[in-house]
Image: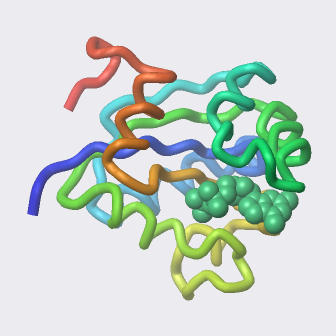
Amino acid sequence: MAIERTFSILKPDATRRNLTGAVNAAIEEAGLRIVAQRRVRMTREQAETFYGVHRERPFFGELVESMIAAPVVVQVLEGENAIARYREVMGATNPANAADGTIRKRFALSVGENTVHGSDAPETAQVEIAQFFSGNDIVG
Ligand code: GDP
């Protein structure tokens, strides 16, 4: 299996409830390494660009508002098969459907406040990482 990098966000519901350490522990216990990390307040423009693929969806406005409501922690995770592995560790988008032991099952409040984001494919990982980090920021 290849060593990959994926982009992760600890969403506002995680920072608000002081859960960033607990989520990071779950990430590390799953064998993923946090090779870049920064706590930021996303601007509306950043959130709209980041979730641009969902612009036409009915929940887009709510999604953007929730992402800018409090700080987030943006991260790059590295490991074997990191993109799929992190999606597995995150659990289903709706925590009601998430498997036991996953981050969303353990911590998420609702589909809108579901604690984490993780890239869904190599192409999106690359674009998402580049939106928040440049080469020197990532130390593997
Ligand atoms: P993900 O890749 O598992 O995060 O899921 P998606 O890319 O499909 O959706 C992006 C984010 O939009 C999700 O993580 C949710 O926070 C949010 N979202 C998706 N579907 C809904 C919905 O029906 N209602 C609300 N309020 N938010 C949603």
Which of these two is toward me, 101 or 127? 127
- Residue ranking furthest to the left: 1
Visible in this render: residue 16?
no
* Direction from residue 70 to residue 89 in the image, left or right: left
Residue at (81% x, 31% y) in the render: 68
x and y, in percent, of residue 79 in the image: 22, 52
Residue at (68% x, 23% y) in the render: 46
x and y, in percent, of residue 19 in the image: 66, 51
x and y, in percent, of residue 9 in the image: 57, 42
Quadrant of picture, ligand 1: bottom right
* Direction from residue 16 to residue 88 in the image, left or right: left
- The relative height of residue 6 versus residue 135 in the rendered view (above or below) is below
x and y, in percent, of residue 91 in the image: 54, 73
Location of residue 109 (image quadrant): bottom right
- The relative height of residue 81 versus residue 40 in the rendered view (above or below) is below
Location of residue 57 (image quadrant): bottom right
Which of these two is toward me, 66 or 60? 60
* Direction from residue 73 to residue 61 in the image, left or right: right
Location of residue 34 (image quadrant): top left
